[in-house]
Amino acid sequence: MKVTKKMGVLVAASCMMLFAAACGNSASTSTAPTTNAAATTAPAPAAGKKITLGFAQVGAESGWRTANTKSVQDSAKEAGFDLKFSDAQQKQENQIKAIRTYIQQKVDVIAFSPVVESGWDTVLKEAKDAKIPVILTDRAVDSKDTSLYATFIGSDFVEEGKKAGKWLADKYKDAKEDVNIVELQGTTGSAPANDRKAGFAEEIKGNPHLKVIASQTGDFTRAKGKEVMQAFLKAHKDIKVLYAHNDDMALGAIQAIEAAGLKPGQDITIISVDAVKDGMTAASEGKINFIVECNPLLGPQLMQAVNDVVAGKSIEKRIVTKEGVFTSEDAKKVLADRQY
């Protein structure tokens, strides 16, 4: 009996060693990322473990951003993800701090909408070294090393500016006198501000009568849009057109225009970007003449991208959202069905 027990112990121990060796090989094989995929592929979460997504939002500067945040939060919940969310309050240093926190927490994927375009290489390199894929949403970065992020999901801001400029150029194609334009820019250094300005300028440059006489940031906020428009009205007596980089600034400007005894949409033609419900309401009332849509509902596309990179699937480097344009008459027709 003693010999039999000893043999049984030896056999059991041998089986345990073989089982442990097999598990060890399996784990190292399944989690070891390849060098080429480091920026786009995360080690797959353990079976039954939720995907953890760290999302660093710009802030809550506008109705568009509020809708964007809700879309991300609702879509993450629907996908069954563990979402770690932070609000940068429009400060780059806050976003960088949040991203570093996500790296320390070893999330599966990091996503963020950059406050500005520049200054991200160092923290993105840290994420890459930690083998955590990064997805850009809504706004791009100007890094020359595109391996630092898996994909960029969002609008074509240059194209949005071009749509605004083309509509204005068509409206004033027969102008015989100068048409004075004032521009409310978005946050200085941000991708939408840079690109919407560039696209608009590109489209109107063929008509020498279309002149931008003043251009200043309104930080994408309604309060700053009103403040800057008040200054424009005091400094310039013959403003014919306002081009605002988002609806919130346009809505603030409308308040300033009405306070000055003028009629928005009539005395001053107004062009805006976003097409959020408040902006579309103003358009339906004739106070905004033309709106270029910028769709904030990026949540579903983001969650699909997160699933794909975690699964190791190939993913497009640039995912562009589909968007339209609206005149005042168009806004009246679709206002009731707007989701944001």
Image (cartoon, helix red, strand yellow):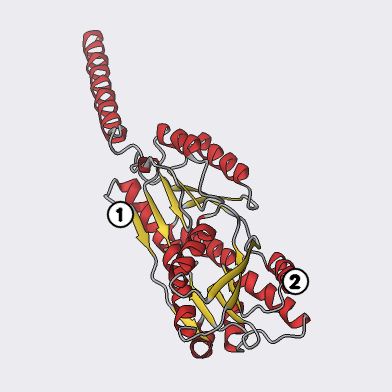
| Among the two numbered marks 2 and 1 on one chain, the one whose residue lies closer to the N terminus | 2
Q: Locate residue 79 relative to residue 37 in the image: left or right.
A: right
Residue at image x 48%, y 66%?
201
- On the question of residue 340 being in view, the answer is no
Instruction: Please state the total of marks drawn on the protein image.
Output: 2
- Mark whose residue sits in front, 2 or 1: 2
25 on left or right of 201: left
Residue marked by disc 1: 316
Label 2 amino acid?
A: Gln
Q: Locate the C terminus by quadrant.
A: bottom right
Please indicate whether residue 43 sits to the left or right of residue 65 in the image: left
Residue lying at 36% horizontally and 59% vertically, measured from the top left: 319
Residue 126: % across, % down: 46, 33
In the displayed orientation, state which residue is furthest to the front.
176
Q: CA distance from mark 2 to mark 1?
A: 44 Å
Q: Are marks 2 and 1 in contact (CB under 8 Å)?
A: no
Residue at which label 2 appears: 230
Q: Disc 1 on helix, strand or loop? A: loop
Who's the residue at 26% across and 23% down the image?
21
